[in-house]
């Protein structure tokens, strides 16, 4: 009878998780694609639009397109096209289904390892409804987040089975699912470290024999992580996504990373002014802010170490948060964002664990019995979840379309050059060239060394018959980004139209040198040389 009641409770909790996710994210089935990577990933990617076939699968496993190697993510997008073509509602729905599955699997992992029903349910509920996770679910291009996390959760379930009764037969599923996860997103490289944490708590393996005794079994997994890191770095380096030390020095990266760790914690407790893009402050980050953040991190780490044996969940949750953020904290700077909501999708689980286990323990220290603790916690916990659902629902609405998304980003972040630029692109594609120019200029004012707004502004100025102004901005674009192939090619074409043929030829050659596969530049160069040959 007791088992039936427990099973019924488990089912009810899973149903509530599903209902909560639907309440927030069902609206996305009425949303459009956004120009923020959805074009590169899906709507303008012929390899995806062709659906599943032998050629496209080979491409998925061999391509580093968009500075990523994640073949399973590409294949999932191909399957979406097979099922829904380019109807965004179906693509959004798959993300919602995956997030729902992740929430339920997280609950099952925690209940299987801790036997703490309501604490496990609260962690899963926070994961399901927290507004910081909206970006990973509402943005179709972040399929890699929700898909890789599915494999993360399945790998943890497999590892729990292995840890209880180690054998080769039980180890192989762990390695297999982990490998699949790495092929969805390399964020999983930290999972072997998380397994070591689980050995400490809640599996209580390493507290008996020590960490080193369980290290050998993790070595094959660490080897896979190292291989994934090498492939990922090569893909991002090849795609030009890795920022140079000239752009962001080691000191600037470290300062931003330290500050971001604390900023994410702040946004977890107070999910306010969330945006699709947070501009990197560069060297403009105040020293006091970095020092203050460092002191906070040191203090929390000290508490975690102090409680390592009496409250082991604290150090496990804290290290989970710290370690799983390392690949995306900005020490290897990819892009020019300071932080991103999507980066917290897995890391926040660690902080949720600290809250779900720590608050009841704090009440126990106040000599409240279990029944009183339950009474004290139930209403506040339900209220917190309800408020988070409302905030997440509102935050999801900003992903409705490009204009809404970037107007919101501009409203909540100062001097957001990327938001201004993307809004300019959206207005340009809608045919409002004057408004596009206005936002390109705002992007340049916010960040004069951002090449893309100069390039796009030059195109818009050409459309309006203002070639001299366009010439200036093309030159600014290639001065800022000397290997900007499209800008060199367009500059060459404009110079050729002005009769400055030698300069045009030089820029075509620079475009081809930057991107040997850039056929437009090759065609323009061939036409120019043919014209000059006839002229002579």
Image (spheres, rainbow, N blue to C red):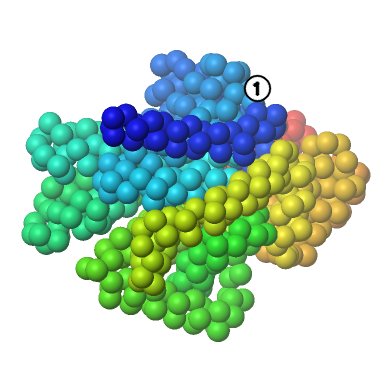
Residue placed at 53% from the left, 22% from the top?
80
Does residue 82 sit above or below 339 in this rendering? above
| Quarter location, residue 323 | bottom left
Q: Position of residue 435 (x, y in %)?
A: 88, 48
Foreground of the two, 415 or 477: 415
Q: Position of residue 291 (x, y in %)?
A: 49, 82
Image quadrant for the C terminus? top right
Foreground of the two, 168 or 117: 117
| Quarter location, residue 247 | bottom right
Residue placed at 90% from the left, 47% from the top?
434
- Crowding at dot 1, Cα within 10 Å, few <14 / some 14-19 / many 20+, comes out as some
Does residue 42 sit above or below 498 in this rendering? above
Q: Quick check: 198 left or right of 366?
A: left
| Quarter location, residue 496 | top right
Residue placed at 49% from the left, 76% from the top?
293
**Residue 458 in sight here:** no
**Residue 449 in sight here:** yes
Q: Position of residue 416 (x, y in %)?
A: 71, 60
Q: Which residue is mark 1?
A: 87
Q: Quick check: 396 left or right of 531?
A: left
Image quadrant for the N terminus? top left
Residue placed at 10% from the left, 35% from the top?
168
Does residue 263 sit above or below 463 in this rendering? below
Element under disc 1: loop
Foreground of the two, 119 or 204: 119
Q: Position of residue 446 (x, y in %)?
A: 74, 65
């Amino acid at each position: 009878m007791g088992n039936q009641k427990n099973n019924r409770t488990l089912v009810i909790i899973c149903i509530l998780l599903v209902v909560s996710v639907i309440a927030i994210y069902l609206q996305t089935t009425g949303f459009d694609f956004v120009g923020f990577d959805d074009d590169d990933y899906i709507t303008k990617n012929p390899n995806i639009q062709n659906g599943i076939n032998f050629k496209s699968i080979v491409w998925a496993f061999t391509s580093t397109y968009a500075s990523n190697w994640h073949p399973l993510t590409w294949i999932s997008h191909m399957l979406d096209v097979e099922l829904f073509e380019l109807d965004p509602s179906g693509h959004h729905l798959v993300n919602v289904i995956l997030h729902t599955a992740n929430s339920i699997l997280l609950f099952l992992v925690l209940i299987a390892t801790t036997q703490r029903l309501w604490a496990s349910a609260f962690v899963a509920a926070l994961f399901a409804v927290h507004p910081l996770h909206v970006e990973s679910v509402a943005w179709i291009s972040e399929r890699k987040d929700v898909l890789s996390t599915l494999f993360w959760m399945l790998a943890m379930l497999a590892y729990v089975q292995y840890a209880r009764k180690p054998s080769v037969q039980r180890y192989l599923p762990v390695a297999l699912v982990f490998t699949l996860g790495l092929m969805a997103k390399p964020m999983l490289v930290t999972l072997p470290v998380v397994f070591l944490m689980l050995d400490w708590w809640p599996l209580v393996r390493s507290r008996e024999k020590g960490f080193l005794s369980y290290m050998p079994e993790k070595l094959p997994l660490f080897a896979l992580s190292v291989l994934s890191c090498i492939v990922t770095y090569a893909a991002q380096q090849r795609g030009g996504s890795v920022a140079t030390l000239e752009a962001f020095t080691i000191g600037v990266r470290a300062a931003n990373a330290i500050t971001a760790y604390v900023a994410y914690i702040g946004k977890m407790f107070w999910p306010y002014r969330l945006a699709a893009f947070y501009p990197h402050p560069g060297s403009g980050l105040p020293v006091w802010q970095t020092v203050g953040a460092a002191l906070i991190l040191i203090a929390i780490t000290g508490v975690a170490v102090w409680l390592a044996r009496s409250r082991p969940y604290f150090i496990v949750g804290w290290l989970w948060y710290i370690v799983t953020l390392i690949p995306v904290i900005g020490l290897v700077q990819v892009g020019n964002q300071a932080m991103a909501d999507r980066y917290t999708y897995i890391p926040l689980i660690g902080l949720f664990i600290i809250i779900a286990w720590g608050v009841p323990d704090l009440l126990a220290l106040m000599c409240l019995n279990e029944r009183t603790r339950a009474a004290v916690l139930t209403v506040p916990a339900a209220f917190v979840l309800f408020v988070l659902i409302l905030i997440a629902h509102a935050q999801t609405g900003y992903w409705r379309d490009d204009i809404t998304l970037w107007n919101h980003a501009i409203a909540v972040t100062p001097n957001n050059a990327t938001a201004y630029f993307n809004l300019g692109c959206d207005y340009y594609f809608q045919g409002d060239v004057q408004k596009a120019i206005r936002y390109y200029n705002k992007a340049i004012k916010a960040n004069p060394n951002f090449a893309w707004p100069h390039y796009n502004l030059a195109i818009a100025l050409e459309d309006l018959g203002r070639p001299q102004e366009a010439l200036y901005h093309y030159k600014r674009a290639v001065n800022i980004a000397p290997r900007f192939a499209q800008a060199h090619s367009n500059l060459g074409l404009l110079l050729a139209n002005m009769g400055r043929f030698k300069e045009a030829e030089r820029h075509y050659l620079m475009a081809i040198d930057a991107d040997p596969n850039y056929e437009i530049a090759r065609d323009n160069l061939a036409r120019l040389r043919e014209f000059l040959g006839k002229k002579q």
